[in-house]
Amino acid sequence: MSLTSFQSWGLVIGLAIGTFLIRYSFIGLFADRDMPAWLDRAFKLMVPAIFAAIVFSGVAMVSGEVAGPIYWPRYAAAMAALMAALWTRGHMLITLGVGMATLHGLPWLVR
Amino acid sequence: MHFSTALKSPPARGAFLCGVGDTLLIIPSYLPFGLVCGVASVNAGLTTSASLALPAVVFGGSSQAVLLQFVQGNASLWIAVLSGCVINLRMAVYSAAMAAHVRHLGKPQRMLAAAFLVDNTFALIQARQASHPHDAHLMAYYAGSSMVCWFFWVLFCGVGVLAGNIVPGSWQLDFAIPLSFIAVAAPSIRTLPMAAAALGGGLASIVFFALPLKLGLIAACLAGLMAGLLAQKWTSRQES
């Protein structure tokens, strides 16, 4: 299936405009005044919730299924990265290095 | 180049370069996903020029992927665009957190800052704010981070469009994406309600993973909020 140029650009521009409106939404509303305290508190809890959702689903889901025991290096790597992140207060290079080294190195070591 | 006038002082330039450097570290993890998104836009039948423009003007991988999935499934184009937008609803949360950071900027710069708001640029600015509280040059850091992120995202998707998928899956490069969020999120969780929100959101993201339109992410956000509010209620009762 192939789309016309008009359809293709319609999709691209449509999604770009929609996404920009979402991105600008609360900046537009609250850049010049303070947010109500209850809303601020709610958003402060939603940030760790979303980040954890990205982590949990990124580690434990493989092509739409929960990653079973044969995927143990993924869980080991995530735990190692978590330790590294807490230990170094979130040093990106060390956390990524420890995580990726565990993912690839540990299965090779215990083989 | 955005925020260029604010970049003339050495500390601002330093913050800008920190943003560039920190972001370069996580860039390789987006290579596989960028390639996939590029390949998907060709497969969905978009013209080459529109395929190349898509990552540049939307700048949000999951929404690009969902848009293209719907187009390929012969959904109405309106539904495809709407679904892509649903994926990006989480950015409203980021927008709310950014509002205070852009207070000193004019409207055009606020809009420019909004345009580059995505999971990783937001995560990095959150981490920067935690490690450098009251830094006057937080937005210079953000400018450096978003420029690098945007450039490589467009590049990776473009390579996918023109050359196809060139990275072997066995490298598992994309596993570095959740790892980078561990680096940012783990040290930032300082209170029991925040930990409860993270645990609730994380578990819910697996339970609700199968929901259409990646609505699982929104469900996880709300579940985390509930868990956090419950924990808040519980801790305040302990104190009184």
Image (tube, coloured by chain):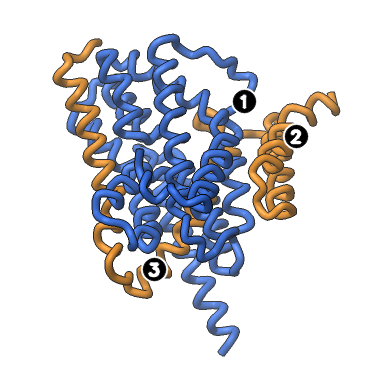
Chain colours: A orange, B blue
Q: Position of residue A83 (x, y in %)?
A: 73, 50
Chain bearing tag 1 is B
Q: Position of residue A105 (x, y in %)?
A: 78, 28
Callout 3 and callout 1 share a chain = no
Chain bearing tag 2 is A
* Image position of B177 with respect to B9: above or below: above
Callout 2 and callout 3 share a chain = yes
Q: Nearer the viewer, residue A10 or A89?
A: A89
Amino acid found under the numbered disc labelled 2: Thr
Cα–Cα span, label 3 and label 1? 37 Å
Residue under numbered circle 2: A102
Residue under numbered circle 1: B172
Report whether B105 appears left or right of A99.
Answer: left
Chain bearing tag 3 is A
**Residue at position x 41%, y 66% in the image:** A42
Q: Nearer the viewer, residue B3 or B101?
A: B3
User: For residue B213, what is the image quadrant?
Assistant: top left
Q: Position of residue B217 (x, y in %)?
A: 42, 46
Amino acid found under the numbered disc labelled 1: Gln
* Image position of B97 with respect to A57: above or below: below
Report whether B238 appears left or right of A53.
Answer: right
**Residue at position x 47%, y 34% in the image:** B148
Report whether A98 appears left or right of B114.
Answer: right
Crowding at dot 1, Cα within 10 Å, few <14 / some 14-19 / many 20+, comes out as some
Earlier residue among tags 2 and 3: 3
Cα–Cα span, label 2 and label 3? 38 Å
Tell me the element at label 1.
loop
Residue under numbered circle 3: A40
User: For residue B237, what is the image quadrant?
Assistant: bottom right
Q: Given contact means CB atoms under 8 Å apart, are the residues at marks 2 and 3 in contact?
A: no
